[in-house]
Amino acid sequence: MRKGQIQILDRAKRYEYSDACIQLLSREDLTLKQLEQLSYDLVDCRTQNDPKWIDEFLRLTRRTDIGWFVHLYVGRHKDVSYDELLRMQSSEQICELFSKENIVCETLLDAEFIIRYGYSENTSELLTIARRFYESYQASLKQDDWRSDWSYWSRIDEIVQRYAELSDYPEIWTTIDFDAWSQSDTRHYIENHIQNYFEENCPFQLKACKGIIKKIREIDFHGYKTTIEANGTSRFVKSSSKCLSISISPYSKVTVNPDGSFYTNVDHKHECHVLYFYAAQRFVTEYSTRSGSRYRATTLKDLFQAISIAEDSADENNAWAVISYLCNRYQTNIYKDLYVDFLQWNCILLPLTIEEASVYHSKKELFQKHYQMPITGDWNKKNANLSYLILKLNKRLSNEGLARAMQCALAPVKSIHVGKNRYKFACMLYSAVCQTEITPLLNDALREEYEMKRIFLNPEAQTINAHNERHRVGDYRRNTPTIRIKKDTRFKKLIDEMPTEFELIRTGNRITKEAEMQHNCVRSYASDISHDKCMIYSVLYDNERHTIEIGSENSRYFVRQCFRACNRAANPELVQKLTSEIRRINQMN
């Protein structure tokens, strides 16, 4: 046996050719070139051991008209029977073999399409697109283009991958320019086509918006570049073939160029991404984790914040277009009502996703069925935020407080981050009812009423006086708290440099004693000290003891509160001295 033939047989055995195939490769009447070609022809059927099947396969594959198709079919379907091979004697028989009731194969190319992608409910439409593209593609081909087969099917892959998920948008596929697609060098033509379609036909339009406040726009900058401290939010809108991305980023500075144009210095750490996926026709919110991006259902809060950044009437109309889209899609006006409430308060407190709200048709139905509101009232006429606060504080409101809350007139309220501090619901409700800013002392009084489950919503002076009186007579007592000042506290420089006459309160017993002597609620600050939110000092000045709270922000200290007993105003000379000391410490390196 020839040396080259031995190598061919060794390779065939290594790739586990069947005995029948090995026997064919052992023939001495064939040249080495013929044996080499035969070994390649047998690759697709190397597991077959029926000589009759192999002979028929080799006969069909040597035909110039259908040989390539038989190779392809057998290569993808290893269990092809002998009867199937006998039914593939011509292109007409092959087309008939792959045709079904609603799917007619006209050419071998149609049959190859089915081999590659199988049958589905969209096969007929996809075949029509593939045929139209093939006509344009063939006309644009050069005869020596060896990449043609790969390039054709890679472009058909684009269609198949996206057609199923976008089958609800037939206009996408009827507006394809097949001549441009066939001549395009990029295989992302379809992705770009889909993106352009949705940019023109999205059910709503949103644009990027810097959210620059009107006062900054009216300033004359005299042609030089400057940066202004200002808090706001910017919106960035980016479209793709899969979704519309709406990114909202808070900023604290605005830079003005000499030509009068603006740009914001955004905080990407607190950026929020709301995505509208075209195929699913729904909103999701993207958030980052260590393992990558994750998605959750978009809440009303995220959506309303994303669309409400407006600088002119056109931006406002774009936002209302989103609301109209949701109302039409879910057949309910609940989104319109809740968005009006959002604009009135500049926040939405209800922790609902878009889908959760979609099953209700009015605010009254929402509160009665979703929240099981125990109080009777006309909730359709009330701001949903106010109704939600009443719901959350129902068991802690006194009868007088509930009556005042139910009679509350409409007033904008500054949203407060609640987190684990549930008493801040009381602060927001108080701000709405009494139309008052929440001062630190008023905050303490409301926290105390919340814990006592007796929220009265009385005027500010009356609320604070009642708070002071409770501590003066010892009517409000709690167990001795625990204080643990952190070793790496951000108040270390303050503790080291503060004059010794100012006593730092370090223990639970000492803060309890301070509260009893001063008849105040300083005991409740023990947790804040342990969490490094503030430091409490006590000082005797002009024969009167003062309790001082010092906070920290951006590595700078400031006096948050300073009161005498019963929360009476501090000595002005002490306040001046204290302010001077804090300024001196802040200026130290």
Image (spheres, rainbow, N blue to C red):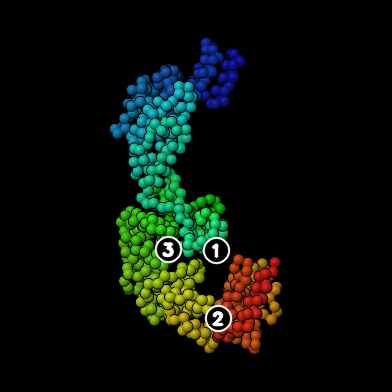
Q: Would you identify the image quadrant in which residue 561 lies?
A: bottom right
Viewer-side residue, 48 vs 139: 139
Which residue matches tag 2?
521
Q: Residue at the spot x=32%, y=73% of the render?
A: 377
Q: Earlier in the sequence, mark 3 or mark 1?
A: 1
* Of the image marks 2 and 3, the number of the one nearer the N terminus: 3
Say whether residue 522 is left or right of residue 165. right
Q: Position of residue 588 (x, y in %)?
A: 69, 69
Task: Say whether disc 2 or disc 1 marks the residue closer to the N-terminus.
Answer: 1
Q: Name the residue beneath numbered marker 1.
A: 229
Q: Nearer the viewer, residue 522 or 91?
A: 522
- Marks 3/1: CA–CA distance: 32 Å
Question: Which quarter shows the N terminus?
Answer: top right
What's the residue type where badge 2 is placed? Cys
Against 361, residue 25 (above or below) is above
Residue that badge 3 annotates = 351
State the residue at coordinates (37%, 75%).
408
- Mark 2 or mark 1, whichever is nearer to me: 1
